[in-house]
Image: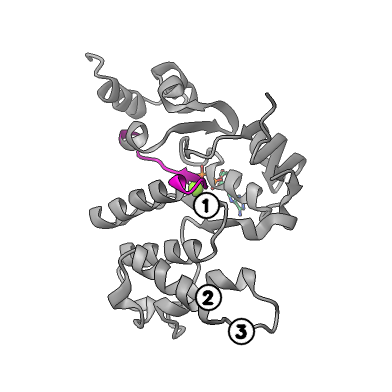
Amino acid sequence: MNIKPVIDIQNLTVSYHRKPAIRSVNLKLTERGIIGIIGPNGAGKSTLLKAILGLVPIDNGTVKVFGEPVFKVRNKISYVPQKEIIDWDFPVTVYDVVMMGRYAHLGVIERPGPSDRDIVEAAIDKVGMNEYKNQQIGNLSGGQQQRVFLARALAQESEILLLDEPFVGVDAATEHAIIDLMHSLNDEGKMVVVVNHDLGKVQEYFQYLIMINQRLIAYGPTREVFKPDLLSKTYGGRLTILQKTEQLFGVAQ
Ligand code: ADP
Ligand code: MG
């Protein structure tokens, strides 16, 4: 049986100032599961997400999403970057930010209608930010801001959700809210791809795992690839990480 990949990456190399950040990556994501991306700092995790979104120039190779070049299907993908670049002094409310998720569906001069407003309200409710709806986003905590960006991604009603380090700097309640959301989106048949650096939660959170260090080290079901040999290949045998894997796998030191 030939299952059509949702995301199909072939021989992908992306460089900044001629220095490759990811090299010759071949990756077909077929499963609509919750997929983690792990690798050390500077391994190219964020770059991989940006390449899927068409946000960085590609040196070599191809990226197809639903069999199309990404610019044709951009509104089927939503993205929460590692750090939002936003002018917090700009007077914008939680509601406004989430409504931005609807603009992908609207024509240039079309204004949001009642159904857009319903979708926005539902998304805000889903991330537990109802009582903050009319607050300025600049006044919120990091975790609350993260929930708002998640609500914006939800309001976009996309098929694929890409999250870059969503758990960094958030409280436990937000982390749980994000996990619940990932599961409910997954139950709706959406693909959720999450960059994450906390190895301790990998087995609990992700059904599939992409391990990268410039080159693709492994991709597969977490239970098959989350193994000491592949981890040490991914992290280059760095001592701290190895110690961490010993804790993870219960290997006596
Ligand atoms: P990760 O998300 O795994 O930490 P990144 O994809 O952000 O890694 O970065 C991969 C490499 O590319 C790093 O060496 C980083 O310094 C470099 N890099 C990332 N973005 C840029 C940029 N805009 N300009 C120049 N170099 C960059
Ligand atoms: Mg990154």
Which residue is nearer to you in this view: 253 or 164?
164
Identify the residue at horizontal 26%, vertical 15% (top origin).
251
Q: Cα distance, mark 1 to mark 3?
A: 25 Å
Residue 133 falls within the magenta-colored stretch: no
Q: Secondary structure at mark 3?
A: loop
Looking at marks 1 and 3 on the same chain, the residue that comes earlier in the sequence is marked by 3
Q: Position of residue 99 (x, y in %)?
A: 50, 75
Looking at marks 3 and 2 on the same chain, the residue that comes earlier in the sequence is marked by 3
Q: Cα distance, mark 3 to mark 2?
A: 9 Å
Looking at the rendering, in which quadrant would you find the C terminus? top left
Residue 191 horizontal side relative to residue 8, left or right: left
Query: Which range of residues does the magenta coloring cover?
Result: 186-200
Looking at the rendering, in which quadrant would you find the N terminus? top right
Residue indicated by mark 1: 161
Identify the residue at horizontal 47%, vertical 55% (top origin).
82
Q: Amino acid at mark 2?
A: Asp
Occupied quadrant, residue 9: top right
Residue 88 horizontal side relative to residue 22, left or right: left
Residue 41's tag is none
Which residue is nearer to you in this view: 165 or 183?
183
Residue indicated by mark 2: 116
Q: Amino acid at mark 1?
A: Leu
